[in-house]
Image (cartoon, rainbow, N blue to C red):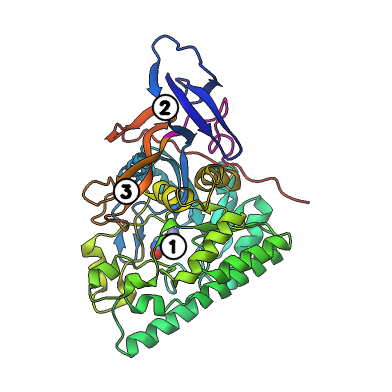
């Protein structure tokens, strides 16, 4: 048992002084002022600190096979790094091989994730359409606790689907009470621009953003929303990075549609300048999709978050080390797309959001935890501080600072996007299902201690 003592509890709705007792079953057993200390209980001092629901990162790619290589971060190292930054749950993406049945891919991911030291769930990608896919979607929803399916409108000749496949999948998801998620970029146009750039001899990482202009994200987002409207299915747009996409989501919500949008902290902090300069590796290390944008888009993303039109923050944590990025020397289309960030998401959002005065503490909790729990049907098991909820907590020092460096981070990757930044707002202690796993600078994690968290289907309308 653990008693978190003397802290200020902050949730998405409330702020109050209370102690929290975490039971041996990993759930919150009691909340109240000055709780008695039961015998044999470990006391965690939270005096002067905030106590918030542990973070939920709803978009990660641990050990993902992608673009001819495999992401360097595995489920153990990745969830450990998350815990060190206050994130206690992830939702990762199951990506089937070319002809692999969806359920087989799900089982593969269950096996890989068995080493995780924090809780996890899965979205499953639909990358083609046939009867077996349709049947497996039902199996996944009804028996495996998957309530969200992923669709890539980009990555031609790899993960990309066309509109008919997308519609079939959306229609099936609607029947099953599942949610659709989408990577929205016009992949045909991206492939066309990539070819043009290579033909002109523009082959370095600076070509990456040129091949993926903001308009292509806007077009794909509008198209995905239109298709979701036809299929009457809720849609969650991952890694929204442009004003165009933000406006499309806001307009659809205003029209009464159930559309959600996710923001990555890195898109709030870095702009397209990261691709300039003569340092090939520095630029390649920022190659992700969608790319870093012109500064003006950042204001739109902040506006979307502050107004509630965009609801969640995630990292899209997808790590590739130097040798892997160097696969793309001479051809930017071969640079594995992806960047790290799971350890730093909460500090980055606190520093640039709360400490800078843009966000309230309650909005921070909503955007790092509660909204994802609600959207993906994990609430109130996760994303809440309530008796009976999982005892996933972060004891947060809002004033402490931390200098970020790859030399000291826990992520299994050889660089950090935020290298050298001093951020205000630090996870001092993390409690994962009732266990103190991060204490100041000490990780105490157990391989395999993470648990798969099934997510029930949503109630079907009509
Ligand atoms: N984002 C990225 O560049 N890599 C991971 C795959 C994806 O989410 O598109
Ligand atoms: Zn994506
Ligand atoms: Zn992703």
Q: In the displayed structure, would residue 306 be above or below residue 387?
A: below
In front: 153, or 353?
A: 353
**Residue 242 numbered tag:** none
Where is residue 54 shown, x and y percent of the image?
46, 38
The nearer-to-camera label among 2 and 3 is 2
Q: In the displayed structure, would residue 48 be above or below residue 196?
A: above
Q: In which quadrant of the rendered view does residue 328 lie?
A: bottom left
**Residue 46 numbered tag:** 2
Q: Which residues are magenta?
A: 378-395
Q: Which residue is mark 3?
A: 74
Q: Earlier in the sequence, mark 1 or mark 3?
A: 3
In front: 45, or 333?
A: 45
In front: 220, or 429?
A: 429
340 lies left or right of 217: left
Q: Residue at x 52, y 76 (%)?
A: 216
Tell me the SS state at disc 2: loop
Q: Which residue is mark 1?
A: 267
Q: Residue at x 38, y 38 (%)?
A: 427
Where is residue 99 shown, x and y percent of the image?
44, 63
Is residue 402 visible in the rendered image? The answer is yes
Tell me the SS state at disc 3: loop
Q: Residues within 10 Å of mark 3 (few under 14, many from 20)?
A: many
Residue extending farthest to the bottom is: 200
Q: Residue at x 48, y 48 (%)?
A: 354
């Amino acid at each position: 048992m653990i008693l978190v003592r003397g802290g200020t509890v902050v949730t998405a709705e409330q702020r109050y002084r209370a102690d929290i007792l975490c039971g041996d079953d990993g759930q919150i057993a009691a909340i109240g002022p000055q709780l008695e200390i039961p015998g044999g209980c470990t006391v965690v001092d939270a005096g002067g600190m905030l106590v918030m629901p542990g973070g939920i990162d709803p978009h990660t790619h641990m050990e993902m096979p992608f673009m001819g290589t495999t992401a360097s971060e595995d489920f153990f190292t990745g969830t450990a790094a998350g815990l060190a930054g206050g994130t206690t749950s992830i939702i990762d993406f199951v990506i089937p091989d070319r002809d692999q049945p969806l359920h087989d891919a799900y089982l593969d991911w269950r096996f890989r994730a068995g080493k995780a030291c924090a809780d996890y769930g899965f979205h499953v990608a639909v990358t083609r359409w046939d009867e077996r896919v349709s049947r497996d979607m039902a199996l996944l929803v009804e028996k495996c606790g998957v309530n969200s399916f992923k669709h890539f409108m980009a990555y031609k000749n790899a993960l990309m689907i066309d509109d008919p496949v997308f519609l079939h999948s959306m229609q099936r998801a609607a029947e099953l009470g599942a949610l659709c998620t989408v990577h929205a970029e016009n992949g045909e146009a991206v492939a066309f621009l990539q070819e043009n750039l290579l033909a002109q001899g523009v082959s370095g990482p600076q070509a990456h953003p040129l091949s993926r202009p903001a308009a292509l994200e806007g077009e794909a987002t509008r198209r995905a929303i239109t298709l979701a409207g036809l299929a009457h299915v809720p849609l969650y747009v991952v890694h929204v990075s442009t004003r165009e996409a933000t406006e499309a989501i806001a307009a659809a919500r205003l029209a009464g549609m159930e559309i959600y949008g996710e923001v990555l902290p890195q898109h709030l902090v870095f702009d397209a300048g990261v691709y300039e300069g003569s340092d090939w590796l520095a630029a390649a290390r920022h190659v992700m999709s969608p790319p870093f944008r012109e500064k003006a888009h950042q204001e739109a993303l902040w506006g979307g978050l502050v107004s509630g039109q965009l609801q969640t923050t995630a990292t899209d944590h997808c790590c590739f080390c130097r040798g892997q990025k160097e696969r793309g020397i001479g051809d930017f289309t071969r640079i594995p797309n992806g960047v790290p960030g799971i350890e730093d998401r909460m500090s980055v959002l606190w520093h640039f959001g709360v400490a800078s005065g843009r966000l309230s503490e309650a909005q921070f909790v909503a955007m790092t935890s509660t909204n994802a729990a609600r959207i993906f049907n994990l609430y109130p098991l996760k994303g809440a501080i309530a008796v009976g909820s999982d005892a996933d907590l972060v004891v947060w020092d809002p004033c402490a600072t931390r200098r970020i460096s790859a030399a000291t981070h826990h992520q299994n990757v050889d660089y950090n996007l935020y290298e050298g930044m001093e951020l205000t707002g630090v996870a001092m202690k993390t409690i994962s299902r009732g266990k103190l796993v991060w204490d100041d600078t000490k990780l105490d994690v157990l391989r395999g201690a993470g648990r798969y968290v099934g997510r029930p289907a949503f109630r079907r309308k009509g």
